[in-house]
Image: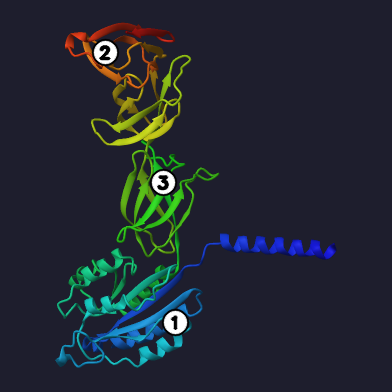
Amino acid sequence: MKLFQRTLLLMFALCCFLQLRAQQPRPIKTRILFLLDASGSMYAKLENDSRINVAKRLLAQTIDSIAGQKNVEIALRVYGHTSPPTARNCKDTRLEVPFRPNNFEEVKKRVQGITPKGTTLIAHSLLQASYDFPTEPYTRNVIILITDGLEECQGDPCAVSEALQSKGVILKPFIIGIGSTEEFKKAFECVGRYYDATTEKGFADALNIVVSQALNNTTAQVNLLDVFSKPTETNVNMSFYDMNSGKLMYNYMHTINERGVPDTVQLDPVFRYRLVVNTIPPVVKENIDVTPGKHTIIGVDAPQGELQVKVEGLTNYTNLQFIVRKHNQQQTLHVQDASVKEKYLVGKYDVEVLCLPRMVFPGIKVDQSYTTTIQLPQPGKLIVNCQLQDYYADVYQMVRNELTWVCKLPVERRNHQLIIQPGEYKIIYRAKGASRSNNTFERSFKVESGQAANILLK
């Protein structure tokens, strides 16, 4: 018996362990490809040494700092190093060290053996680099391009980079421009995030910043501002999308903590974000950058008030709903249940209540932190009994001596009960077999709140 109990306990413990493991998020692997310019111009001076020697020295230091990180793999691709400049070889790019675990020393050794020779082919190298990353889920594919020259092979680095990002192959590349000019910087802004390296210290700082962004998340808070520019709005989901690929990256339900401050969220600083705050209607903020190592505050105007429809007295409505649209616009924002409060951005809305007859309230104003209530009168009931075998019948409301169509009575039924708003009405009907228009008949009636109107069609 004891052995059986012990076995049950062990099985229970194993099940709990496996469930806990299943609930834990799978760690994300970061793959960093160093794309190194080894064209002939890399022999030019950067302060007291050549650009290539500075790049080799700082890359070695950077690789050493990465080597102890978990879930990180690196690789090395070089261009312009196998053909002389006279050959103008626009295919001169090669993956020197592929991605694999613990290849840090191999990459350092291969970097030291690089000899600059030829031309600058950035677009083709970026395209080839996209094939260097293994196809595997739960990874972040990062390219760090180190270059001192502009494209020389009539390629379009911007178009290649944008295409790879939009397909989700790579994240937005980092570019470190050595000895760059303003023209140089402008040429690369569309390729990725650009950093100047006009001195060795500037190069080292840029590498540190880039690697920090590639490896670390950072913190941010979203301030949902009311009409007084105070961060008081909360309890709404926020969706963060990658601006380039459109991929959904994060969902956070906005929270204000016990100190009355919007809660802190974790964001990957590699991305530039489009934020959608899922209010009614949504609020969108684009081109959001977060700085690694710093707490970023993102302000979004999202002032809100509440809207509801109430019916006076007792009612037989079982599921009364209403449509909400922006004032003078046709698009439906929301279909809301009556007697339920819902938040909307401050502004004017058109409300269409799906009762019989439908009631439209244009230009309803929603104010900050205030509940706007549309009050409907208590409805009555229309009871229709039909002695005709087959017929056509429609209900109309009399509005300022004009008929307004309300609904059609289903011909397959002989008895009808409708919950209907107070007012003056007519039923206009004709037997289906009647062959003349003068066989059309009318029944006028009045509906009062909380009362039933009985109509006989014969």
Mark 2 highlights which residue?
429
Q: Quadrant of residue 346?
A: top left
Q: What is the number of the mark on residue 223?
A: 3
Residue located 30% across and 61% down the image = 244
Q: Quadrant of residue 3?
A: bottom right
Residue located 19% across and 86% down the image = 119
Q: Are marks 2 and 1 in contact (CB under 8 Å)?
A: no
- Alpha-carbon span between mark 3 and mark 1: 42 Å
- Which structural element holds mark 1? loop
Image quarter in which the N terminus is found: bottom right
Which one is nearer the viewer's eye here, 157 or 350?
350
- Alpha-carbon span between mark 3 and mark 2: 60 Å
Which one is nearer the viewer's eye here, 99 or 400?
400
Mark 1 highlights which residue?
100
Q: Please tell me whether residue 99 is drawn above or below residue 319 in the rendered image.
A: below
* Of the image marks 3 and 1, the number of the one nearer the N terminus: 1
- Which structural element holds mark 2? strand
Q: In the image, which is nearer the foreground, mark 3 or mark 1?
A: 1
Q: Which amino acid, by three-letter code, is at mark 3?
A: Asn
Image quarter in which the C terminus is found: top left
Q: Within 10 angstroms of label 3, few (less than 14), some, or many (20 or more) residues?
A: many
Q: Please tell me whether residue 252 is drawn above or below residue 165 in the rendered image.
A: above
Q: Within 10 angstroms of label 1, few (less than 14), some, or many (20 or more) residues?
A: few
Q: Give the x, y percent position of residue 52.
A: 30, 87
Q: Can residue 164 be seen by looking at this rendering?
A: yes
Which one is nearer the viewer's eye here, 354 or 360?
354
